[in-house]
Amino acid sequence: MSELDKINSIFNAKIDNVKNKEELQNIKTEFFGKNGQISQQFKYLGSLDSDKRKKFASDLNKIKSDLSNQIEQKFFEIENLEINEKLKNEKVDVTLPVRPYQQGKIHPVSQVIDEISSIFSEIGFSVAEGPDVETEYNNFTALNTPEDHPARDMHDTFYLQKDKKLLLRTHTSPVQIRAMLNGKPPFKIIVPGRTYRCDSDQTHAPMFHQLEGLHIDKDITMGHLKGCLYYFIKEFFEVKNVKMRFRPSHFPFTEPSAEVDIGYRIENGKIVIGEGEKWLEILGCGMVHPNVLKNANVNPKKYQGFAFGMGIDRLAMLKYGINDLRAFFETDYRWLSHFGFDPLDVPTNYRGLSK
C-alpha cells in the first residue's frame, strides 16, 4: 500500500467516527494543517525523481480534493443533524429578534498562495520554506549581489545588527541558497512567504509577500522557463491563451535576465488579462547565474536552471480587482468581508475555496 493510500485509509476510518464539528476541525488540522499529513506530502515532492514527480503530484492533488469534499460533506451532515436535534428538543419563539451572526473570511493573500501552490505542484514543483530573519550572506552575497548594490542600503533593508550580518529578508530568494546547500540537484521548488523592505505607498508596503521559483537540472533552458510561466499565467488567470513577452532586464542572481509582460485590455473599466494591445509587467526571471550555483556548492558546468520571482499581493490585486495594497494589512473586517473567501461551508473547487 502506497503512502497516499495509507493516508486515505486513515482519513476514512477517522471521518466515519466524527460526531461533531470540533472533531471534524481536528481532522482537518491533522491532514491539511501546516504540518498535516497532506501538507507534508507536498514538501516530499522535491525529493522525487522528475519522472515520478508529475504522477505523484497528480495523485496527491486528487486525494487532496477527495478528502476536502468528504470534510465538506461531513460538515453539512453534522450541521443538519444538529438542526434536526434542536427542532425536536426546542421550541422556537419566532417573536425574538434575529441573533447577530458573523463568519470569518479567508484573506486574499492566503487564497492566492493556495492557488499558486496547487498550480505549480501539478507540474512537479514542491513548496519550500525559510526564516524571515536571514543572514546577509544568504540574502545578498550568495545571490551574487555586490556590496555596493543599492538594495543593501539602510533605506531599503531592515538590518537587525549594527554590523549588518542579520536582517529581515528582502525577498524569498535566500531559500534558494538554503535548499541547494542542504540538498543535491535536481531542485524544483517554489517559495511563498513574507518579505520586508523600507517602502510604503499605494502599491508598496514594508511587509509584503513574494513567491520565488527555482528549477535546477541538466540541460534546462529559457524555453523551459517560458513554458513554465506560460502555463502558470494561463491557469492562474483562468484564460485559454496568454499574450506574453520577455523583455531584457538585469538581476544580480540571473544571467540572462528578463521581465515578463502579459497583454491586457480595459473593458467596462476592468482589466482583461491575456489579450489586448497594452502590456503589464508581472514578474522577473532568468537563468540562474553561475556564481550563485558556485556559492551553493552546485557545479555550474554540470547543472543549470532558471529562477523567477513575483509579488503575491500584486497578483491578488490583479485577479480580484483590489486597487490599494495597504488595505491588505489594515485589519478592516468590512474590507475582508468584501474581498475575502468563504471557508469550509462553501463548496470547494479543485484549487482551493471558491469566492
Image (cartoon, grey):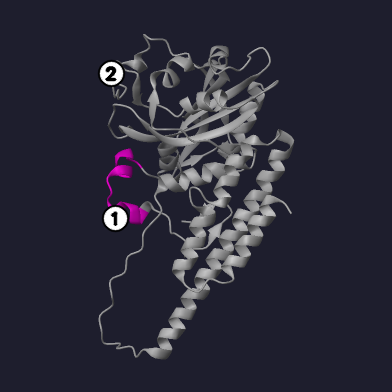
Of marks 1 and 2, the one in the foreground: 2
Region of the chain picked out in magenta, as a range: 323-338
Looking at the image, can residue 260 be seen? no
Tag shown at residue 334: 1
The residue drawn where x is 43% and y is 59% is: 342
The residue positioned 48% from the left and 16% from the top of the image is 142
Label 2, residues with CA under 10 Å away: few <14, some 14-19, many ≥20: few
Magenta segment: does it hold 330? yes
Query: For residue 91, which quarter of the picture?
Result: bottom left
Whether 174 is among the magenta residues is no
N-terminal-most mark, 1 or 2: 2
Q: Which amino acid does label 2 sit on?
A: Met
Give the x, y percent position of residue 73.
55, 69
Provide the secondary structure element on which disc 1 rests.
Answer: helix
Structural crowding at the residue carrying mark 1, measured as other residues with C-alpha within 10 Å and reported as few (<14), some (14–19) or many (≥20) = few
**Which quadrant of the structure image shows residue 88?**
bottom left
Left or right of 218 on screen, residue 104:
left
Q: Is residue 24 visible?
A: yes
Q: What element carries label 2?
A: loop
Front in this rendered view, residue 216 or 285: 216
Indicate the position of residue 281 as horizontal and vertical percent values.
Answer: 47, 28
Identity, as a three-letter code, of the amino acid under mark 1 = Arg
Q: Is residue 91 above or below residue 329?
A: below
Q: Where is residue 126 in the image (x, y as percent from the top left)?
A: 59, 38
Q: Where is residue 174 in the image (x, y as percent from the top left)?
A: 46, 25
* Residue at horizontal 44 percent and vertical 59 percent from the top: 343
Is the residue 80 above or below the residue 171 in the image? below
- Identify the mark at residue 351; answer none if there is no mark: none
Tally of numbered tags: 2
Residue corresponding to mark 2:
154
